[in-house]
Amino acid sequence: MTKIMLYSAFAAYAASVLCYLLNVGLKRRSLQTVALLLVLIGFVIQTTQLGLRWNAAGFLPVTNLFATQFFFSWALAATYLYFELRYRIHASGLFVMFMNLLLLGSALPRDPQLPPLIPSLDTPLFTLHIIFSFVGYALFAMAFSLGVLYLFQRHIGAHQLPELSQLRKLNEEAIFLGFALFTLCMIAGSLWAYIAWGTYFSWNIKSVWSTLVWIFYAGMCHAKFIRRWQGSGYAWLSIAGFGVVLFTYLGIGLLLESNHPLE
């Protein structure tokens, strides 16, 4: 059942990407509507599957690589739907949903089993830490996508894409919301660490790099007011920042020893 739902969500997202691609050439409003509907279907399937796994496990099942990729994909779909339903970004969804397709597709071959929860993670603070973390990551991924689209639009001027001023506004909003949620993630993580290990901060590599992510995006929230960083500069910062996020999420967990291993 898990695999069936997983592949169904993947198929819905793949079909949505195909509709967005067709719309680039055909420019039909009906294709945009169908693409959005397919994203909604995929998101509902993922949400249902997440709820079933959460109920079966008795805790938020985000404790291994498959689970984090699945939850990251779910958060990215939710983030895209927020921006699409609020701002009607339309063709911008092609790049965002293609990223989501890669993320969910990389989880398909992995084992979806539910591993047991270690005692130090058995706290509501762990759940809050994870939710704030990955929704923040998803918003940073959205900002990365908008940064790429901003640079593309500046050089190409495609009429299917939003105006540069709107892309800049959306990028800044994604960064601000992501930073706010990642701040809450850091607070919940610090309280959780104190309860589990008696210290609010430990100098392990994951904590250090998470702090660097927070500092980087705190700087970006300030950079939008500095003239030389506005526009293309801010777009490049969004791209670079997501590189730091990916290393913090995947690079440390897979390549280095930390208290946040990914298996």
Image (spheres, rainbow, N blue to C red):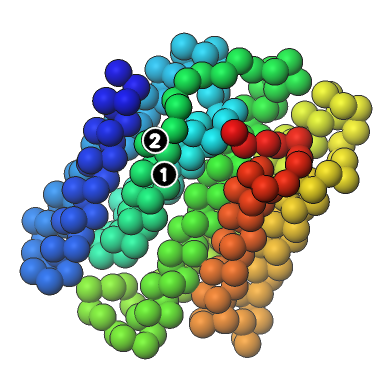
Q: Is residue 21 left or right of residue 53?
A: left
Alpha-carbon span between mark 2 and mark 1: 7 Å
Looking at the rendered structure, the secondary structure element under dot 2 is: loop
Q: Are marks 2 and 1 in contact (CB under 8 Å)?
A: yes
At horizontal 19% and vertical 44% (from top left) the residue drawn is 37
> Which numbered circle lies on residue 109?
2
Q: Name the residue rendered at 54%, 57% in the picture.
A: 140
Please tell me whether mark 1 sits on a helix, a strand or a loop: helix
Disc 1 residue type? Answer: Ser
Image coords of residue 234 (percent x, y): 56, 76
Q: 30 left or right of 89?
A: left
Could you say which quadrant of the image residue 64 lies in? top right
Q: Nearer the viewer, residue 187 or 225?
A: 187
* Residue 187 on image: x %, y %: 75, 40
Residue at label 1?
106
Above-or-below relation of 196 to 186 = above
Q: Can the viewer see residue 74? A: no
Q: Amino acid at mark 2?
A: Pro
Rendered image quadrant of residue 189: top right
Rendered residue at 37%/29% (across/down)? 47
Residue 109 seen in this snapshot: yes
Across and down, in percent, residue 181 comes to 61, 46
Q: Residue at x 66, y 74 (%)?
A: 223
